[in-house]
Amino acid sequence: MGAIRFDNVGRIYGTKQDGFEALKGVNLDIADREFMAVVGPSGCGKTTCLRFVAGFDQPTSGIVSVDGVQVTKPGPDRAVVFQQFALMPWKTVCENIELGLRNKGVPKAERIKKVNDILALMSLTSYADAFPHQLSGGMQQRVSIARAYVLDPEVLLMDEPFGALDAQTRVVMQEELVRLARRNPRTVMFITHAVEEAVYLADRVAIMARQPGRVKEIIDIRSVREAERWDDHEKIEDVMDLESFVHLRTQIWRSLRQEKAMEIA
Ligand SMILES: Nc1ncnc2c1ncn2[C@@H]1O[C@H](COP(=O)(O)OP(=O)(O)OP(=O)(O)O)[C@@H](O)[C@H]1O
Ligand SMILES: [Mg+2]
């Protein structure tokens, strides 16, 4: 359940004759319940790829599928967390989080319990009745993450979800996401510019290149994490100090820097 496949995917914006080739020959397999981080230079097509899986957009060539079924539209099996929070301004925090459950037809008593649980988890309980404009950016982002988690979807699509958070809140959210992901694994496609974040969170990291956008390298994190017992360390900074962590981070940095160098040359 929840296995994602990109099969020779391309996307041309504009006309086929006179268009911009944003993606070409993207191949990527994200296994059921695997946490895949995607990194790459700005404009390489990360968001475009995520939108295909969400069903908001379609490739101009190739196929994107979930569990072997071609994606043609959004569905309740896939939830998206955007960089921009996209909350409904006229609804309270509680109502924003509840909306998806309502649309799924979850009975009221169960909705209330689920919403209360996730509010507590995200330290938002005292803001349940606030409106989005009364919250800071970091709090709004927690609401938008809560809104996705509460649906317990098979596939979680996250586009730089922590980009707008302050450094401390970001660490709390990262540790929380790791706890959630280990306790209740879901298939996750997680876009980020932060290499440390990718290494800390993911089972594998896909590195994209641009012009045209494609997946150029995949780095396995999970085997190292398990062999080196990263999960024995509770705090993110302790994990980030480990030699095995630093090694992977450097490897990804080098690969990204190579892209940048090619761009400038
Ligand atoms: N609707 C559109 N019309 C034309 N070009 C587009 C459209 N959407 C995206 N593009 C182009 O496709 C390329 C990939 O865009 P995309 O937003 O997927 O990049 P990204 O990797 O998410 O970048 P960033 O890291 O800055 O968010 C970019 O060159 C962008 O200009
Ligand atoms: Mg993007």
Image (tube, rainbow, N blue to C red):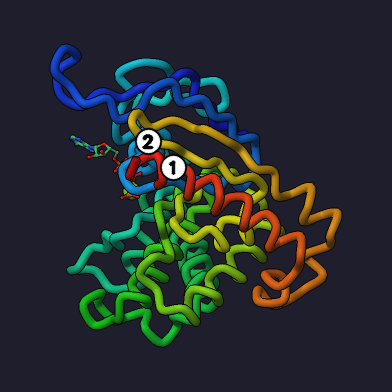
Residue 47, x across and y down, in percent? 35, 43
Q: In the figure, 237 relative to 6: above or below?
A: below
- Calculate the distance from the C-alpha at mark 1 to the C-alpha at mark 2: 8 Å
Q: In the rendered view, does 28 fall on the left or right side of 180?
A: left
Residue at horizontal 41%, vertical 26%? 71
Tag of residue 259: 1
Tag of residue 132: none
Tell me the quarter of the picture where residue 192 sits.
Answer: bottom left
Q: Is residue 222 visible?
A: yes
Residue 194, x across and y down, in percent? 48, 61
The residue carrying mark 2 has its beta carbon less than 8 Å from ligand 1: yes
Q: Is residue 156 visible?
A: no
Residue 255, x across and y down, in percent? 54, 45
Residue at horizontal 43%, vertical 19%? 63
Of labels 1 and 2, the one closer to you? 1
Please report contact status of discs 1 and 2: CB closer than 8 Å, yes or no.
Answer: yes
Quadrant (top left, top right, bottom left, bottom right) of the N terminus? top right
Q: Which residue is mark 2?
A: 210
Q: Amino acid at mark 2?
A: Arg
